[in-house]
Amino acid sequence: MSAWIDLSAQLPADGARVLAFVPGHQIVLPGKLEIEVREVIVLRFHLNFFADDQERCAAHGAHFFSGEGVSNQYFRSVSHWQAIPSGPGPS
């Protein structure tokens, strides 16, 4: 498996789906009132997403991570990323 890459060291490619580390990320489990911490989620990276919106760019960073469902994350919420590993080979 790949090593975690600090976002300050290297950005993912624009449009890449990656495993993202979001410190303290909490979700509400479907059908339950429980909250669970899930700090590793799959996100798609968008380079310069807020480049034309100076207010959001200043508040959250120029880039953005879109997720599946309601898991979108502002750039500054994600600390590290890594490539999604390939699936298992033939049995």
Image (cartoon, grey):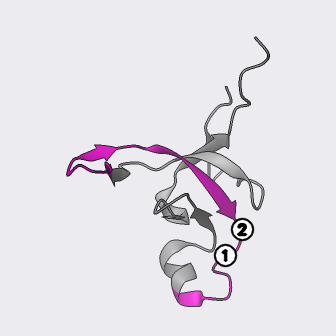
Q: Is residue 56 above or below residue 85?
A: below
Give the number of the disc on residue 76: none
**Which quadrant is the C terminus positioned in?**
top right
Q: Is residue 33 magenta?
A: yes
Q: Which residue is mark 1?
A: 49
**Which quadrant is the N terminus positioned in?**
top right
Residue 45, x across and y down, in percent: 67, 60
Residue 84, x across and y down, in percent: 68, 38
Q: Is residue 76 magenta?
A: no
Q: Residue at x 56, y 59 (%)?
A: 67
Residue 57 shows up from this direction: yes
Q: Residue at x 63, y 69 (%)?
A: 63
Residue 39, x across and y down, in percent: 43, 44
Q: Residue at x 21, y 47 (%)?
A: 34
* Label 2 Cα neighbours within 10 Å, binned few <14 / some 14-19 / many ≥20: some
Q: Which residue is mark 2?
A: 47
Q: Is residue 28 above or below residue 74?
A: above
Secondary element under disc 2, as helix, strand or loop, is: loop
Kindly check if marks 1 and 2 are in contact, taking CB atoms under 8 A apart as contact: yes
Is residue 33 found left or right of 24 in the rendered image? left
Q: Residue furthest left?
A: 33
Residue 13, x across and y down, in percent: 78, 55
| Number of numbered discs on residues | 2
Q: Is residue 34 above or below residue 87?
A: below
Secondary element under disc 1, as helix, strand or loop, is: loop
Amino acid marked by disc 1: Phe
Amino acid marked by disc 2: Leu
In space, the residues marked 1 and 2 are separated at their CA atoms by 6 Å
Residue 10 shows up from this direction: no
Magenta stretch in the rendered image: 28-55
